[in-house]
Image (spheres, grey):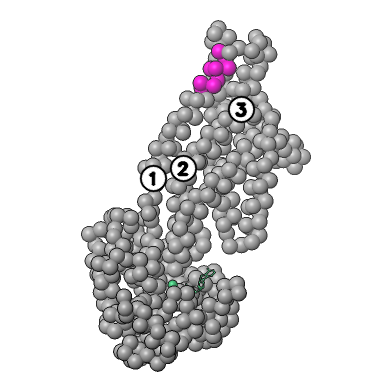
């Protein structure tokens, strides 16, 4: 227990990094996932194919490899630099890798949501003269989102937990890595371990309940 | 029929063909709809009536032939097609009101987003139209809170809000409980009286007799017969039509 107390401030700072990664990851992956699903249902074959390939490749690659690729491939080889400060740069590398990965799951959740929207909705939208993008934005996606709020909550919970492999992308300041560092010093400590688990549950459990509640509240009645 | 003095037909179909895979659903269709005309399309299920309707606003593409609307060949895609569709109203069998929007929003969406009409003006017009179809009191409800007959009347208001040159009705009363059929037909008869150009797929003989100028009988992808409503219902020329009429008359 004293191990936990001794390392608590450091672990808390690490956990804060998990939260920061989660916030950036949630926003970016929701946006990117929406763009991907728009590509996947678009009438343009090239866009559809690109979206499908992206989702299938990224979704089936282990996250640690996606992050390693972001760091080694994109940052080191292709020179994608977010900041001249190495720690800030690797934060963004990991945040983007995580978003790119999570976006594939967001896309697939949204696509199953689109499948719940009756074809007649899109036909009525086209019949009053809305363009494809307008009908997607105003009619289809709003209904699709509401249909998959709970699954999106699960995707977000998985994403939050996935921030703990940030070190695979070269970012060594999150709580999981701090935990490993502490264990290297004092040996495995169950209180430290449980402390981190509880911290994550304090974030993820409410998200699960909240999205479940929101899903019921916003359900589209047909 | 051409009170506005423009004698060119509003819709012209020339040798239109359409297949679904091996199925030939529109066989060399030639048809014109004049401005202000109310055309009823009748015929057995699977005969291609819906496909014909949907081809006119290009919800279905055609394989060959020509469809001319208001003097122009139907645009194939993009902004021009969206503009054409905004000029052709469509009322579906299953209403298809936007489920996540209120009744008022269903009616204002097209004018504001497609035509760029200001919100206030569109809202005011929507209330007038909802008044006209008798649903004004429900403006802030959602579609699922309305009966089928009410939803279909809203769908008509939504089409009217675009000031269309024509409205297509694809079996607008077929999904309704019997007691709600009349309220929708009454609205449609009103539109016909006001001179709206209408193409109506329906088996409602009462409506055809009260409002239609012409009846087209369609079966197996072909226009088999066309005539005035009275002539058609009392004195059909083809066996096919007589056979069909004997079936719907026994109901
Ligand atoms: N999207 C489609 N794909 C394949 N076949 C279709 C499709 N839509 C309609 N059909 C077929 O085309 C024929 C004509 O259909 P339709 O135009 O709906 O007839 P109607 O409205 O007169 O009942 C039917 O045999 C129907 O099964
Ligand atoms: Mg039909």
Specify the quarter for ligand 2: bottom left
**Which of disc 1 and disc 3 is earlier in sequence?**
3
Where residue B36 sits, quadrant-wise, is bottom left
Q: In the image, is the residue at mark 1 within 8 Å of ligand 1 by its beta carbon?
A: no
Position of residue B128 relative to residue B190, above or below, is above
Report if the CB atoms under discs 3 and 2 are less than 8 Å apart: no
Marking on residue A218: 1
**Which of disc 2 and disc 1 is earlier in sequence?**
2
Q: Nearer the viewer, residue A163 or A220?
A: A220
Across and down, in percent, residue A21 comes to: 57, 32
Residue that numbered label 2 is attached to: A149
Marking on residue B146: none
B62 on left or right of A212? right
B220 on left or right of A56? left
Across and down, in percent, residue B183 comes to: 25, 70
**Mark count:** 3
> Which part of the image, by quadrant, shows the C terminus of chain A?
bottom left
Query: Disc 3 to disc 1, how far (Cα)?
Result: 32 Å
Residue that numbered label 3 is attached to: A164
Report if the CB atoms under discs 3 and 1 are less than 8 Å apart: no
Residue B169 seen anywhere in this rendered image of the structure: yes
- Name, please, the residue furthest toward the right: A77
The residue segment tinted magenta is A191-199
- Give SS at disc 3: helix
Report if the CB atoms under discs 1 and 2 are less than 8 Å apart: yes
């Amino acid at each position: 227990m004293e191990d936990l107390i001794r390392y608590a401030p450091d672990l808390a700072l690490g956990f804060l990094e998990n939260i920061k990664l989660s916030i950036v990851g949630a926003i970016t992956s929701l946006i990117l996932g929406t763009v991907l699903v728009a590509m996947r249902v678009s009438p343009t074959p090239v866009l559809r194919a690109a979206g499908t390939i992206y989702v299938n490749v990224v979704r089936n690659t282990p996250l640690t490899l996606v992050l390693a690729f972001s760091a080694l491939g994109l940052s080191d080889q292709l020179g994608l630099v977010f900041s001249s400060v190495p720690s800030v740069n690797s934060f963004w590398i990991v945040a983007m890798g995580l978003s790119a990965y999570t976006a594939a799951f967001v896309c697939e959740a949204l696509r199953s949501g689109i499948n719940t929207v009756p074809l007649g909705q899109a036909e009525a939208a086209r019949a009053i003269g809305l363009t494809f993008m307008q009908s997607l934005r105003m009619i289809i996606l709003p209904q699709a989102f509401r249909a998959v709020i709970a699954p999106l909550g699960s995707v977000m919970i998985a994403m939050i937990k996935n921030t703990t492999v940030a070190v695979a992308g070269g970012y060594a300041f999150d709580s999981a890595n701090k935990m490993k560092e502490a264990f290297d010093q004092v040996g495995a400590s169950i209180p430290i371990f449980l402390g981190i688990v509880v911290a994550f549950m304090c974030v993820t459990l409410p998200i699960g309940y909240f999205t479940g509640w929101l899903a019921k509240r916003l359900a589209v009645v047909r | 029929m051409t009170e506005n003095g423009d004698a060119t037909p509003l819709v012209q179909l020339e040798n239109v063909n359409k297949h679904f895979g091996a199925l030939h659903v529109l066989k060399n269709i030639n048809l014109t709809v004049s401005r202000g005309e109310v055309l009823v399309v009748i015929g057995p299920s699977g005969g291609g009536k819906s496909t014909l309707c949907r081809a006119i606003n290009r919800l279905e593409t055609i394989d060959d032939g020509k469809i001319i609307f208001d003097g122009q060949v139907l645009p194939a895609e993009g902004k021009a097609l969206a503009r054409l569709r905004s000029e052709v109203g469509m009322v579906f069998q299953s209403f298809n009101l936007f489920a996540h929007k209120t009744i008022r929003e269903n009616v204002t969406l097209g004018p504001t987003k497609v035509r760029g009409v200001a919100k206030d003006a569109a809202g005011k017009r929507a209330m007038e139209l909802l008044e006209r179809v008798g649903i004004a009191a429900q403006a802030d409800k959602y579609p699922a809170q309305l009966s089928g007959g009410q939803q279909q009347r809203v769908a008509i208001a939504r089409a009217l809000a675009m000031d269309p040159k024509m409205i297509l009705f694809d079996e607008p009363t077929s999904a309704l409980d019997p007691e709600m059929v009349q309220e929708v037909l009454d609205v449609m008869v009103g539109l016909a009286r006001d001179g709206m150009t209408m193409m109506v797929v329906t088996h409602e003989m009462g409506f055809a007799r009260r409002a239609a100028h012409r009846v087209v009988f369609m079966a197996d992808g072909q226009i088999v017969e066309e005539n005035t409503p009275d002539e058609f219902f009392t004195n059909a020329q083809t066996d096919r039509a007589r056979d069909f009429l004997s079936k719907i008359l026994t109901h």
